[in-house]
Amino acid sequence: MLKIKEQIVFITGFFPYLQGGAELQSYLLAKRCLPELEVSFVFRDHWGKGSSKDKNGYNLHPIRPVKLIGLGGSFIFETRQLYNILTQVKPRYIYVRGANAYLGIATRYAKHNYTKIVWHIASDSDVIPFSASPLRAIVSDYIDRKAIEYGIKNVDSIIAQTQFQANRLLLNYSRQAAVISNGHPIPEDCVKTDTPVTVLWVANWKPIKQPEFFVELARTLATEKNIRFVMIGRNDRYSDLVELAKTNNIEVIGEVSSDRANDLLAQSHILVNTSLYEGFSNTFIQAWMRRVPVVSLRVDPDNIIRNGQIGFCSSGNFRELVQNTGVLIRDSKLRNTMGARARKYAIKHHSLENIDEILKTIIQ
């Protein structure tokens, strides 16, 4: 008689459809769950994909986004859809990555159905309490945030990507978190040509990623010789900035697959990050594993870049960003030393063993 597998539900974006860092990490974890567990993904469906199985055998349960006149779209409006899916699947475990009202909805289901639920922090902003201003916040935003806070306070276990996130969680919500960093497959080593020096920017273009700073960086460093600036990532709604980037001799490639992004990183010499904040950028790890030091405008998770000497953090100062990038462009010896150090660090601290640790936290 065949043993019925226990079910685990992932509530996060589905990676092939949405190629962000949190989605990639969830996909790697889902692969690790097979064949011991039956895996389902529940996600907000902006593509009209419908229910199905993917090539790995994951059960896909899309949720139709709901918008109400005058209130726009809100995760809380999709409560019934999510609750019905969970009732149908009857999972033994629920894994939620990121913070939206689905976290609270799933937590309420778990508490009434003997289901273990684990929340994985995806961004530093996830652990910042909501401060509603009556003049700014609409009712649905407030309800969404209250659902998130209910989830944070009542999930069984929490995983943080950094000690900073764990400290903020303890300070703001009096909850403890296991600190487990992101994990990635270790690629083969790569050999880089000295010229041209390729400076890469990788992100989906949106306000918190601040792509305009990279465009200005390229303009400021335009007199440097043997230099190539490249931007990759989904850039719809940024047509004017795309044109400005091209006039500053930036190669704007657009959205690419994860494999293609890794190929571009392997050919690059410097990764520039201009984000206001991150969780723990997967792109940092992918770059470090490919001997690419990171020059960051302000993000330095747990001061790893500074302490490990695997790039530069510019403390939010654009002039420092220009200076730090320029130093690495001109000093190939420093660049190669940082790159070698970065690969060694990433292999030691960010292998797929971290994915195994996350799975243990879920099913223990």
Image: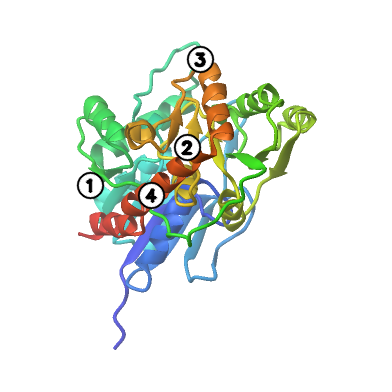
Name the residue that disc number 4 marks: 346
Name the residue that disc number 1 marks: 156
Q: In percent of the image, x 54 and y 71: which residue is there?
A: 55
Question: Nearer the observer, disc 4 or disc 3?
Answer: 4
Question: Nearer the observer, disc 4 or disc 2?
Answer: 2
Q: Give the residue type that dot 3 points to.
A: Arg
Name the residue that disc number 3 marks: 136
Q: Secondary structure at mark 4?
A: helix
Q: Secondary structure at mark 2?
A: helix
Outermost residue toward the bottom?
1
Q: Secondary structure at mark 1?
A: loop
Mark 4 / mark 2, whichever is N-terminal: 2
Q: Give the residue type that dot 1 points to.
A: Asp
Mark 3 / mark 2, whichever is N-terminal: 3
Q: In percent of the image, x 67 and y 40: which residue is there?
A: 230
Q: Which mark is residue 334?
A: 2
Q: Nearer the viewer, residue 292 or 92?
A: 292
Question: Nearer the observer, disc 3 or disc 2?
Answer: 2
- Residue 110 sits above or below residue 212 on the image: below
Mark 1 / mark 3, whichever is N-terminal: 3
Mark 4 / mark 3, whichever is N-terminal: 3
Question: Nearer the observer, disc 2 or disc 1?
Answer: 2
Image location of residue 9, percent across then percent down: 38, 58
Looking at the image, residue 276 sits to the left or right of residue 211; the answer is left
Q: Nearer the viewer, residue 244 or 327?
A: 327
Is mark 4 in CB contact (under 8 Å) with mark 3?
A: no
Mark 4 / mark 1, whichever is N-terminal: 1
Is mark 4 in CB contact (under 8 Å) with mark 2?
A: no
Image location of residue 8, percent across then percent down: 35, 61
Q: What separation in Å lies between label 4 and label 2 (alpha carbons)? A: 18 Å
